[in-house]
Image (cartoon, rainbow, N blue to C red):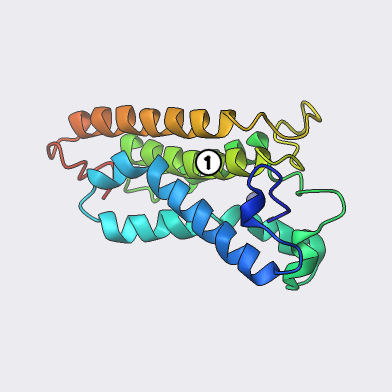
Amino acid sequence: MSPYRGWPFLSNASHPFVSAVWAVLSHGCLALFIVAPLLWRSRHRVVYGLIAFVGGSALDVDHFIEAGTLNLHRIETLPGGRPETHSVAFVLVLALLTFALCPRSWDRTRRFVAAWAVFAVNMGHLLFDAAGGSEHILYPWNQVDGIPWLLCPIGALVLFGLSWVIARRSSRSSPQGPLLSVAVQ
Ligand SMILES: [Zn+2]
């Protein structure tokens, strides 16, 4: 939730609340799109869809932590740009933690799908934010600031495609048939 130079119609420093609402809606809709193939094959697509929508903005909690306040104007105008946790490295850590902390009763396929969903949703968030700059997406390996705008839609489509492949393979490996009943219960 910093100024979106790549999406100037989404943010306005003089209207921080409206900017925050737009950011939540944008991240939520992008998250739903990216994991749509998994949601479609799930028996609990409404609940998981809600989790994906909310999870699409979860990464922005780091703005509040960095700013040390709930003031929307302050969190949207952090002097150093977005916190370093807006990076692929941090998203990878989140996905690995998800895999490791899933309930013991879940099989490897279901744990992998959960970890992928966390990775894909947060990568979508990173791509959207990075299209406007003010984000060290490759921290700590590289201090590159943002990405070319076109990489955001292309990256989102790639993530969608990978979700589609994972959904198909997971449903095939599920002993309960094609509803992905084990992988995405
Ligand atoms: Zn963000």
Q: Residues within 10 Å of mark 1 (few under 14, many from 20)?
A: many
Horizontal and vertical percent position of residue 147: 68, 31
Taking the spot 80% from the left edge, 48% from the top edge, the residue there is 81
Taking the spot 53% from the left edge, 41% from the top edge, the residue there is 124
Tell which of 121 and 1 is nearer to you.
1
**Residue 44 placement, left or right of 128:** left
Reply above or below: 38 against 148. below
In which image quadrant can residue 151 be found?
Answer: top right
**Residue 30 placement, left or right of 150:** left
Tell which of 167 and 80 is nearer to you.
80
Tell which of 118 and 176 is nearer to you.
118
In which image quadrant can residue 17 be found?
Answer: bottom right
Horizontal and vertical percent position of residue 160: 39, 34
Horizontal and vertical percent position of residue 5: 71, 45
**Residue 150 placement, left or right of 98:** right
Taking the spot 21% from the left edge, 41% from the top edge, the residue there is 180
Reply above or below: 168 against 85. above
On the image, numbered disc 1 is attached to which residue? 124
**Judging from the image, what secondary structure is the residue with disc 1 in?**
helix
Using the rendered image of the protein, determine whether residue 107 is visible from the camera's viewpoint.
no
